[in-house]
């Protein structure tokens, strides 16, 4: 039988964002694949060179539509390091609270997408219904469901009152019960196991070669989490586990993400219990002294890196962004090698692609 | 590496190992604020230094590569990570920036090197020729991250 070339994308029902895969199939089996990205390249790194540090906070929030808060966090902590500015503890705690809420929201969204792609629509409905709880919390705290605009250089712009504190604790307890049910489904449901086990396998050695980060790497046994490895308050004062798995397939990635959601829920409760009093932000100077910094943070998809070089003015000389999806994208041709055409959707959803992040 | 080691201790160990390996070349080391150690080196020594970093210090994780047009040279920064950050810095001449590619040793570097190639016009020796990564197929407006000189700005 002759080989057939199948284009997936840039616009395709399987993909939520534009990216193009050109698959070559021999019968049902994928024998070759090529990737073309850049369809949502907005030139954010170049745009940042013409904007002030304050304006860039809102620009980098738009790198990603799911983990927007992580980008402003990484950016702000970099600029704060350049300024030598100490953020008040309450500001750091609230920043971390939003980060963990966002991780829960991102992982639940992803679980829904995976469930839909393996044909388990019930779990898709559950995951997206329960994601509303965390979106409502974020809306109550920041005013926005996806773009929060919470971070400013020097701290955060929101504070939590007693009623909000109580509401968040109650809602998180409610959500924790739901996520335990999701975990039970992922661990025992036959459909999900049949569709995801032994699919998209990558070994720990391959993860190291391709410098993969986040839940995808942790599912292959790479024990790396910047919340623990690059300790910063409040994570230094909180106790949490880093979830790893050894199977290295899409199922392992699912288990890692759902268990991480539970860890994040516990982290949120701890943050709220230990929330210190005081101001939420320190005043930052407009001009940043000459210097350079590499700022790293653990996003829902793994390590985000910002390189910021300042030149003494109110605009940066260079801002470089590396998003975790880029590290996962590069492994897709290997993961797709030899899989059946029907499993392509499972492999693609397994790495949790965020194309807008990757293209910037 | 032992997790209890401080950044200063690690920095001293790396410095020692690099001095032993390259006695004839002064490698410049300095800390970036609070985070990374930065090492400036000549481009031809890049592969050898990366080999030492990976084999002796287990810095297998290349976080990313940054290209900077600083007006005088093209700077390429390799950000490595293993509980601490190490940034390798090479300066390339403005007119003909050539540097050996890391992709053959670290396959994960491919996207970063391809991006710098199309954004700054750096030639990575050993990086396979492929189409554009981020820019459009019919992009003709030059190298996006190169600084626009004063004369060019006035012309626009």
Image (cartoon, grey):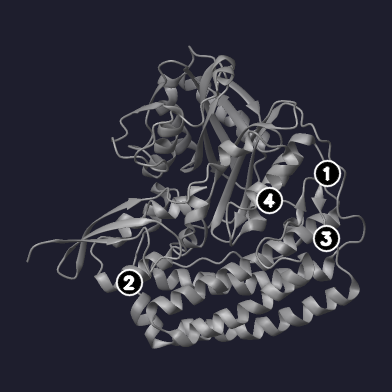
Q: What distance separates the C-alpha of mark 1 from that of mark 2?
A: 47 Å
**Callout 1: residue from which chain?**
A
> Seen in the image, is A204 located left or right of residue A60?
left
Q: Which residue reaches farthest right?
A: A278
Number of other residues with Cα within 10 Å of mark 2, as a class: few under 14, some 14 to 19, many 20 or more = some
Please identify, in this view, whether the residue under mark 3 or under mark 1 is nearer the observer.
3
Q: Which residue is mark 4?
A: A72
Please identify, in this view, whether the residue under mark 1 or under mark 2 is nearer the observer.
1
Q: Is residue A289 above or below residue A252?
A: above
Number of other residues with Cα within 10 Å of mark 4, as a class: few under 14, some 14 to 19, many 20 or more = many
Q: Earlier in the sequence, mark 1 or mark 4?
A: 4
Res. A1 image quadrant: bottom left
Q: Which residue is mark 2?
A: A198
Residue A111 pos. (x, y %): 50, 74
> Seen in the image, is B62 located left or right of residue A36?
right
Number of other residues with Cα within 10 Å of mark 3, as a class: few under 14, some 14 to 19, many 20 or more = some
> Seen in the image, is A136 located left or right of residue A6?
right
The residue positioned 55% from the left and 80% from the top of the image is: A127
Q: What distance separates the C-alpha of mark 3 from that of mark 1?
A: 18 Å
Q: Which residue is mark 3?
A: A158
Q: Which residue is mark 1?
A: A86
Is there one chain holding both mark 1 and mark 4? yes
Q: What distance separates the C-alpha of mark 4 from that of mark 3?
A: 14 Å
**Callout 2: residue from which chain?**
A
């Amino acid at each position: 039988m002759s080989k057939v070339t199948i284009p997936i994308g840039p616009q395709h029902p399987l993909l939520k964002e534009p990216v193009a895969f050109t698959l070559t199939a021999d019968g049902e089996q994928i024998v070759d694949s090529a990737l073309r990205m850049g369809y949502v390249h907005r030139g954010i790194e170049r745009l940042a060179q013409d904007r002030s540090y304050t304006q860039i906070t809102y620009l980098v929030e738009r790198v990603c539509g799911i983990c927007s808060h992580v980008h402003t966090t990484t950016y702000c902590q970099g600029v704060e390091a350049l300024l030598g500015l100490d953020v008040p503890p309450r500001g750091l705690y609230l920043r971390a609270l939003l980060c963990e809420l966002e991780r829960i929201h991102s992982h639940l969204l992803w679980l829904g997408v995976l469930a839909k792609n393996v044909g388990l629509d019930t779990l898709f409905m559950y995951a997206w219904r329960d994601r509303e709880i965390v979106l409502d919390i974020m809306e109550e705290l920041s005013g926005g469901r996806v773009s929060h605009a919470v971070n400013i250089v020097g701290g955060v712009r929101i504070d939590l009152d007693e009623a909000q504190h109580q509401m968040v604790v109650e809602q998180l307890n409610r959500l924790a019960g739901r996520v335990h049910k999701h975990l039970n489904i992922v661990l025992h449901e036959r459909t999900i196991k049949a569709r995801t086990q032994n699919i998209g396998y990558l070994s720990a050695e391959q993860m190291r070669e391709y410098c993969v980060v986040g839940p995808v790497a942790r599912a292959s046994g790479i024990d790396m989490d910047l919340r623990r490895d690059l300790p910063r308050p409040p994570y230094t004062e909180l106790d949490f586990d880093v979830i790893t798995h050894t199977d290295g397939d899409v199922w392992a990635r699912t288990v890692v993400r759902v268990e991480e959601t539970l860890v994040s829920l516990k982290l949120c409760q701890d943050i709220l219990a230990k929330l210190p009093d005081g101001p939420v932000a320190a005043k930052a100077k407009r001009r940043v002294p000459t210097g350079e910094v590499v700022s790293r943070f653990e996003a829902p998809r793994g390590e985000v890196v910002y390189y910021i070089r300042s030149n003494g003015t109110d605009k940066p000389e260079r801002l470089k962004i590396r998003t975790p999806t880029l590290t996962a994208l590069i492994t897709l041709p290997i993961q797709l090698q030899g899989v059946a055409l029907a499993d392509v959707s499972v492999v693609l959803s397994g790495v949790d692609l965020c194309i807008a992040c990757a293209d910037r | 590496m032992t997790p209890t080691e401080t950044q200063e201790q690690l920095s001293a160990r790396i410095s020692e190992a690099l001095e032993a390996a390259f006695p004839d070349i002064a490698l410049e080391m300095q800390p970036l604020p609070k985070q990374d150690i930065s090492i400036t080196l000549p481009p031809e020594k890049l592969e050898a230094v990366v080999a030492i970093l990976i084999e002796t210090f287990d810095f297998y994780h290349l976080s990313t590569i940054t290209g900077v047009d600083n007006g005088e040279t093209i700077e390429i920064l390799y950000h490595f990570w293993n509980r601490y950050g190490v940034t390798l810095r090479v300066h390339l001449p403005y007119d003909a920036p050539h540097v050996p590619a890391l992709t053959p040793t670290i396959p994960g570097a491919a996207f970063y090197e391809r991006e710098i190639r199309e954004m700054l016009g750096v030639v990575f020796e050993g990086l396979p020729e492929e189409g554009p990564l981020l820019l459009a197929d019919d992009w003709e407006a030059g190298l996006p991250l190169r600084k626009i000189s004063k004369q060019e700005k006035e012309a626009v």
